[in-house]
Amino acid sequence: MDNTPLRLPGKNALSEYVLSFDAVGLRDIERVGGKNASIGEMIGALTQLGVRVPRGFATTADAFREFLGQGGLGGRINAELDALDSADVTALAACGARIRRWIMDTPLPPPLQQALLGSFRAMAAGRDIAVAVRSSATAEDLPSASFAGQQETFLNVRGEAALLHAVHEVYASLYNDRAIAYRVHQGFAHAQVALSVGVQHMVRSDLGTSGVMFTLDTDSGFREVVFITSAYGLGETVVQGAVNPDEFYVYKPALRAGRRSILRRGLGAKAIKMVYAEAGSAERVRTVDVPAAERARFSLSDEEVEALARQALLIEKHYGCPMDIEWARDGTDGELYILQARPETVHSREGRTLNRYALRARSRVVVEGRGIGGRIGSGRARIVRSAADMAQVQPGEVLVADMTDPDWEPVMKRAAAIVTNRGGRTCHAAIIARELGIPAVVGCGTATELISDGQEVTVSCAEGDTGYVYEGLLAFDQQRVELDSMPPAPVRIMMNVGNPDRAFAFAALPHHGVGLARLEFIINRMIGVHPRALLEFERLEPALQATIRAHMAGYADPISFYVERLSEGIAQIAAAFAPEPVIVRLSDFKSNEYANLIGGRLYEPHEENPMLGFRGAARYVDAAFRPCFELECRALLRVREEMGLRNVQVMVPFVRSVAEAREVTELLAANGLRRGERELKLIMMCELPSNALLAEEFLQYFDGMSIGSNDLTQLTLGLDRDSALMARAFDERDAAVKALIAMAISACRRQGKYIGICGQGPSDHPDLARWLVEQGIDSLSLNPDTVVATWLFLAGVAPDGRAGRPEKL
């Protein structure tokens, strides 16, 4: 793509109407609007640093005001808007239509037409070029309000007549229904907003890829990542939510250090793409299906993901705030371009206040998709098939649609929640839901079929990456925590984290790291295949191979799939809580649980009591399972050494004997995880009576212990912890259990080694938590939903500010 600076003819004479992007910056927002000023700012300040921005030109706000001055057009528009009740959707539509018709009936002033054509000819330099014609309002891309998508953008505009018509259409779009309603909602006076039009070289992403990236996590606000979405073709499908894109998280500290920096990859469906229409067609663009082979691979290489993230860091550093950036890869020259950048407007406004939501009970799941916003909402579902029917949505209802676009915004703020068939985390519905502070579940596939119009539903986005639509109106709790007013705790409070999708959100809680990251949770959620089935993939039956291929789509081979997915899950938790320690427990599947993984029944024995069988350290040293264990070691090494996340520590579960302790630590060392090297600590679970009774001997091989109160109680009292018949007798506070815990604490303290607890006990029983502190334990690792309550309890403060024991949250 030609990206040379644009030299406009008669620049001084044209400056009243048109300015080259090279000649504007953030100082010119009042002249060319927020979007065009930002494009010029990046060209002027960041091009030399490697940020590529397509060149072009912008009309001025004065040109727009001159246009409105013709025949009293501006006065008529203001009078019409002053009399409008924007809450009346029908009246809003009629008012907007009248204003847009007036604008299209009013010709562009001849001097403006001449300036546009002169600039376009200079830009084309005799070639047949395609341009994007974009809106840029003077009250746009501000830290307090983005105005993103309020006015129109026209792609693949060719020829002078098409250019003039597109500019005219952009002018009219300042008075789209959605733009009028948004200005009212944000408190901007209509008459104070002027419009500039940007004309920019088209990037041939119709032959490549495009998407959106944010310099923070859009759901949690976690700022140490760049979040990138990508799909094939022009970027409108991603922005509109018409396609479920690929997703990538890039860890900023690793990127700056030149290390492997991609924390997580998610393969999107990418079912369609937008491309140029054929020459002579009445349409400029069209949508086509993506071939199955392209859907099954990532639309960006790792190198391209990191290159985009580096450009995002440069932009964020220059602007000094989190950024929302549109990008495209040209399919002809292979280069990555930044199309526009604006301040992120949701998390940038938030303070140090944490709002947490939790359902009191659950019901039948009607449909599920991608959860947005971390909140819960409920109401009657309103199925809306098209924008023409959106006035049916009443305040407090749940809006259910195939997808939304900016035309829907006047009614979206009425909704208690939003549910869509299509879309990813950066689609229109997701962006608006975050801005409005309501939950949204997007990309459900069949929500408009499975949810009945008028049905009472509860929309929950407070349970992880997956959002659920439940049957009925369910009760839920909301907790507001002022993080800056938390009192000091008398002990280190850590967290038990199994789901990497929730790590960024959990890291917003007060904490001292992760005392238990469960590897088996990551294997189950992110891999779902038995490791031996991947190691022996070529020997499997064709049908099983086909099932596994579907799971490993986007990855080079079965082994890479296992190691990379496992390392991604570990890295996401480690990055979220860095620099605090993250203690990763090696896999502790029992044989019946391993058997439930794809291919697992081929390799797992049948055991009458798997809880006491082939699990923990005994598996790792077993000759048949050892190659599987070595894959876990490779994943941990990848996180610690290649990504530099050395806050990851390793914990070994269910070590039955001192001999087993010696054998497993030697095996870890043989696989590159040697205790004491490069800050590596090895911790053992203290969950068998033998561990407490012989704690001094076990500690020869470990840097500390973490008490697993669930298994320790089971094995001390002779209770099956999964037995409903014996549930009433299961109590971690039993005197025998506490005696063993006290022994382990004393042994670790005598040797100056770490001692913590990661079992369920202190999460369920604050009195047990207090007793553990009195015994001198170093840390309590709690379930995230009990962290704040237990913290305040141990600090002597209830959640409402009074002394005493808090209610369970």
Image: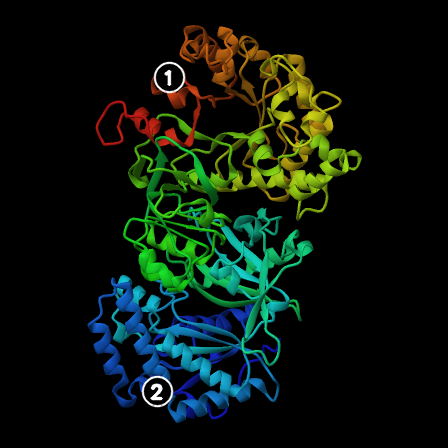
Q: Is residue 303 above or below residue 731?
A: below
Q: Tag 1's secondary structure?
A: helix
Location of mark 1 (residue):
768
Quadrant placement of the N terminus: bottom right
- The answer to whether residue 639 is visible is no
Residue type, mark 1 in image: Leu
In the rendered view, would you say 604 is above or below 254? above
Q: Where is residue 526 shown, x and y percent of the image?
A: 59, 38
Q: CA distance from mark 2 to mark 1?
A: 77 Å
Q: Which mark is residue 453?
A: none
Query: Which residue is identified by label 2?
Result: 106
Image position of 631 (left or right of 430): right
Judge by depth and name the residue closer to the eye, 607 or 323: 607
- Residue 27, x across and y down, in percent: 37, 74
| Residue 67 in view | yes
Q: Does 94 sit left or right of 684 as displayed?
A: left
Pick the residue in front: 202 or 597.
597
